[in-house]
Amino acid sequence: MEWAALWWRVLPPLAGLALLVGIWALATNGQGAFPTPAATFAEAVKVFGDPFYRNGPNDQGIGWNILYSLQRVGLGFGLAALVGIPLGFLIGRFTVLNRMVSPLVSLLRPVSPLAWLPIGLLVFKSANPAAIWTIFICSIWPMVVNTAVGVQRVPQDYLNVAKVLSLSEWKVATRILLPAVLPYMLTGVRLSVGTAWLVIVAAEMLTGGVGIGFWVWDEWNNLNVQHILIAIFTIGAVGLLLEQALILVARRFCFEE
């Protein structure tokens, strides 16, 4: 029975992938400029055969480009978590702060993340910190909003018990709010890391240097469509792995059962 359940979990994704490759093969059967799945796969074997080569600052393997992008995402996302999660707790806990900060969040959250990139370039005078700044500003909003909503949905009875027991604000936050808010907070983290990985590709296209986004743009300048397709699938695979890792963390810390 377990094997049957596993099979039905694996079969649909494989069927969907096979359907995509089949449509791709049919669409490129006319020997046009777009590469076929077989040619792209053969090129991918070469690319990943030596992913960490170095032939200069602007000619490095795809492995180095992925690692540089992940490093920028990690720094920007980590800073956003350090600021956004506590801010979400404060907004959800204190009504006055909520009324003061919520309009600012509503005003700034819809702004395109790439609109913040020129501000980062102006302030930091360098492409790398500007890209990290862009990741920070686009990652912070889902964590702020979801954490605040989670705090606001904590049953009032829990807080009334805290008042009766004369618990300090720190104990209320750590003993009552945190376990109840954790699912909301982790949902915000998942949304934030997905957004961060999307934005870093576009930011690196604009700023240059080393990174998977720059690698895509550089291959476009070289008219190497096969490498662009390889990068697209690689970006999707890395994003999927990041999301699945956070789903596992969310299940590990779920208190509902």
Image (cartoon, helix red, strand yellow):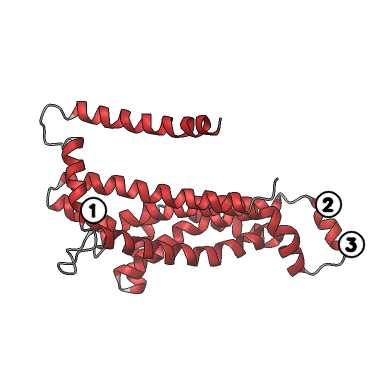
224 on left or right of 76: left
- The amino acid type found where label 2 is placed reads Asp
Query: Identity of the amino acid at label 3?
Result: Val
Q: CA distance from mark 3 to mark 1?
A: 62 Å
At 46% from the left edge and 49% from the top edge, which residue is drawn? 243
Helix, strand or loop at label 1? It is helix
What is the spatial separation of the Cα atoms under label 2 and label 3, in whole angstroms?
11 Å
Residue 44: horizontal and vertical position, in percent? Answer: 21, 47
Location of residue 193 in the rendering, given as x and y in whole percent from the top left corner: 46, 54
Determine if residue 110 is in view: no
Q: Secondary structure at mark 2?
A: helix
- Secondary structure beneath dot 3 equals helix
- Mark 2, other Cα within 10 Å: few <14 / some 14–19 / many ≥20: few
At horizontal 56% and vertical 50% (from top left) the residue drawn is 187
Kindly identify which residue carries mark 3.
164
User: What is the CA distance from the residue labelled 2 to the residue labelled 1?
Assistant: 56 Å
Identify the residue under disc 1: 48
- On the question of residue 78 being in view, the answer is yes
Q: Residues within 10 Å of mark 3 (few under 14, many from 20)?
A: few
Q: Amino acid at mark 1?
A: Phe
In the image, residue 149 lies at what x, y percent? 64, 51
Apparent side of residue 251 relative to residue 178 in the rendered image (left or right): left
Question: Residue 34's quadrant in the figure?
Answer: top left
**Residue where numbered disc 2 is placed:** 157
For the N terminus, the image quarter is: top right
